[in-house]
Amino acid sequence: MTRLLPRVALAILAGAVIVFLAVWLGDVRRYNHAVMIGTPAKASRADLQRALSLSRDSLHLRSDATPEIFAAGMLARLGDYKGAVRQAEHVVATQPDYTVGWFFLAQIAAQNDPVLYRRAVARLHELRPLTG
């Protein structure tokens, strides 16, 4: 009985690792597919909406905010500027030193909200003082 216990524990641990890896790989595949269909300049509205959906579905095990920022970009390309700003603001609120988030927030706000644009650019310069 005492020899069986470590084997059972190892089998349970191996099963948990397999489940974790399956979910993680699924997330990676969904995000990569979102980028593939949503990045082209001539992507259709349906492609952009599908890319947005896939990027939101790929957030389970990500430690970075890349899918969230990508989703903000898709929202902007779909014409939902308020949604895009909300998404990007959420990212920079939770990760205030994430330069990519501030960059995307500045890009999204550039044409619609000059005050927010200046705030995002100022934060970028705080984080990366040598950038032009």
Image: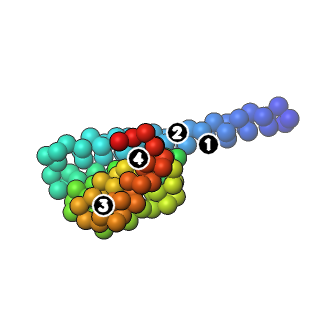
Q: Are marks 2 and 4 in contact (CB under 8 Å)?
A: no
Secondary element at image label 3: helix
How far apart marks 1 and 3 lie (CA) works out to: 43 Å
Q: Which of marks 3 and 1 precedes in the sequence?
A: 1
Q: Which mark is residue 16?
A: 1
Secondary element at image label 1: helix
Q: Residue at x 51, y 54 (%)?
A: 95
Q: Are marks 1 and 2 in contact (CB under 8 Å)?
A: no
Residue named by callout 3: 109
Amino acid carrying mark 1 in the image: Ala
Q: Which mark is residue 100?
A: 4
How far apart marks 4 and 1 lie (CA) works out to: 33 Å
Up-down relation of residue 95 to residue 115 (above or below) = above
**Where is residue 33 drawn, in percent x and y?**
31, 42
Residue named by callout 2: 21
**Where is residue 16 drawn, in percent x and y?**
61, 42
Secondary element at image label 4: helix
